Image (spheres, rainbow, N blue to C red):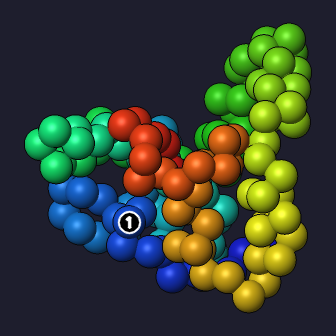
């Protein structure tokens, strides 16, 4: 496995302590120490335009091995439906942008919805991965 360290944009830091997530939510594996293990960060954000405010509803980091175990716990039918949904709804603009990703920073890919292609600042609720 070829793991490499990537600077984590501040958007993906913990809202509690403003630092990068350091451990897997499921197994408590250290994510920032050698040997590096691939992991994913998820944040769900709710925007309150009338208050000019955003609130993180939940956020976590999960290592790839735990994510794989959780995925495999879903039924085959559920996994197939999720895959079909993304294949059908993934924005062509998002696909094209990621094909040219080598010259983009990680924070460049979080401004538009990967499903609708619309700017996330127009959404009242969104998830970041």
Q: Residue at 61% across / 66% down in the picture?
A: 109
Relative to the observer, which residue lies in front, 24 or 76?
Answer: 76
Q: Can residue 22 be seen in this view?
A: no
Q: Position of residue 97 (x, y in %)?
A: 77, 68
Determine which quarter of the picture holds residue 49: top left
**Residue hosting label 1:** 11
The quadrant where residue 84 appears: top right
Q: Where is residue 113 in the image (x, y as percent from the top left)?
A: 60, 49
Quick check: 66 above or below 111?
above
In the image, 78: left or right of 121? right
Task: Tell me the residue at 51%/82% (across/down).
Answer: 7
Identify the residue at horizontal 83%, vertical 52% (top origin). 92
Q: In which quarter of the image is residue 12?
A: bottom left
Is residue 89 among what the camera can see?
yes
Q: How crowded is mark 1: few (under 14 residues within 10 Å), some or many (20 or more)?
A: few
Name the residue: 48% across, 51% down. Answer: 120
In the rendered view, would you say 108 is above or below 21? below
Label 1 secondary element = helix
Q: Say whether residue 127 is left or right of residue 6.
A: left
Residue 68 is situated, as x and y percent measured from the top left of the image, at: 72, 38
Query: How far from the left and from the top, in percent, is residue 94?
Result: 75, 57
In front: 68, or 7?
7
Q: In this view, does 19 lie to the left or right of 111?
A: left
The image quadrant where one finds the N terminus is bottom right
Q: Which residue lies most toward the left here?
A: 51
- Name above or below for residue 79 compared with residue 36: above
């Amino acid at each position: 496995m070829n793991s490499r360290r990537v600077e984590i944009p501040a958007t993906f830091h913990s809202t509690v302590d403003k630092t990068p997530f350091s451990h897997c939510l499921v197994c408590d594996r250290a994510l920032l120490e050698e040997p590096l293990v691939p992991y994913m960060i998820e944040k769900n954000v709710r925007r309150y335009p009338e208050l000019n405010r955003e609130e993180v509803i939940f956020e976590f980091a999960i290592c790839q091995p735990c994510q794989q175990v959780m995925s495999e716990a879903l039924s085959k039918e559920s996994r197939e439906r999720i895959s079909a949904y993304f294949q059908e709804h993934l924005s062509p603009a998002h696909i094209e942008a990621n094909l040219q990703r080598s010259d983009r920073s990680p924070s460049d890919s979080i401004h538009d919805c990967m499903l609708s292609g619309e700017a996330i600042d127009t959404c009242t609720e969104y998830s970041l991965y």
